[in-house]
Image (cartoon, grey):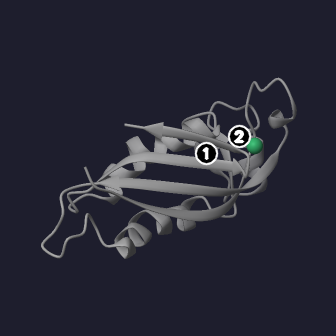
Amino acid sequence: MYTVTRYHDISCGHRVCGHENKCSHLHGHNYRITFVCTGELDSVGRVIDFSVIKDRLCMWLEKNFDHRFLIWEDDPLADPLLALDPKVVKVPFNPTAENIAEYLVKTVAPKQLEGTGVKLVRCDVEETRKCTASYIL
Ligand SMILES: [Zn+2]
């Protein structure tokens, strides 16, 4: 199996609802998000051109998550925060690194990679240089 990997860095706010400690506070990270795609080789000998991963996945992050605050739609702070800043992003999951990775693999990538014949099979969401969560299909 061939894989191709590209990462993208974004800055994002979040809070983890129900966290026992300081992650329940409003805070943010300089996230590094790594995409691992797989597929058959094309006539040139590539799974997919790296620029297509950039255009389809990295630019999705730029447009939808970068410099935004992610808040779970069930979080009691969701509506008050949205009232203060309409650019706050309501997401259908508690925004842990694990859940962000799964959402990118299962919800975002299938739409973004449609027609390429390529699949996102792994996503790593790094919150700090020491802490990364992954979702692997
Ligand atoms: Zn955090």
Neighbourhood count class around disc 2 (C-alpha, 10 Å): few under 14, some 14–19, many 20 upward: some
Neighbourhood count class around disc 1 (C-alpha, 10 Å): few under 14, some 14–19, many 20 upward: many
Q: Hey, which quadrant is residue 77 in on the image?
A: top right
In the displayed structure image, the side of residue 130 where residue 43 appears, left or right: left
In the displayed structure image, the side of residue 57 where residue 17 appears, left or right: right
Q: Residue at x 77, y 52 (%)?
A: 28
- Badge 2 vs badge 1, beta-carbon distance below 8 Å: yes
Measured as percent of width and height from the top left, residue 88 is found at 68, 54
**Callout 1, which amino acid?**
Lys
**In 3D space, how far apart are the residues under numbered discs 2 and 1 (Cα atoms)?**
7 Å
**Relative depth, front residue between 70 and 102:** 102
In the displayed structure image, the side of residue 49 where residue 31 appears, left or right: right
Measured as percent of width and height from the top left, residue 125 is found at 59, 48
Name the mark on residue 78.
Answer: 2
Q: Residue at x 39, y 41 (%)?
A: 106
Measured as percent of width and height from the top left, residue 103 is found at 48, 42
42 versus 86 height, above or below: below
Which structural element holds mark 1? strand
Name the mark on residue 2.
Answer: none
**Callout 2, which amino acid?**
Ala
Return the disc, 2 or 1, that comes first in the chain's sequence.
Answer: 2
Q: Which residue is mark 1?
A: 90
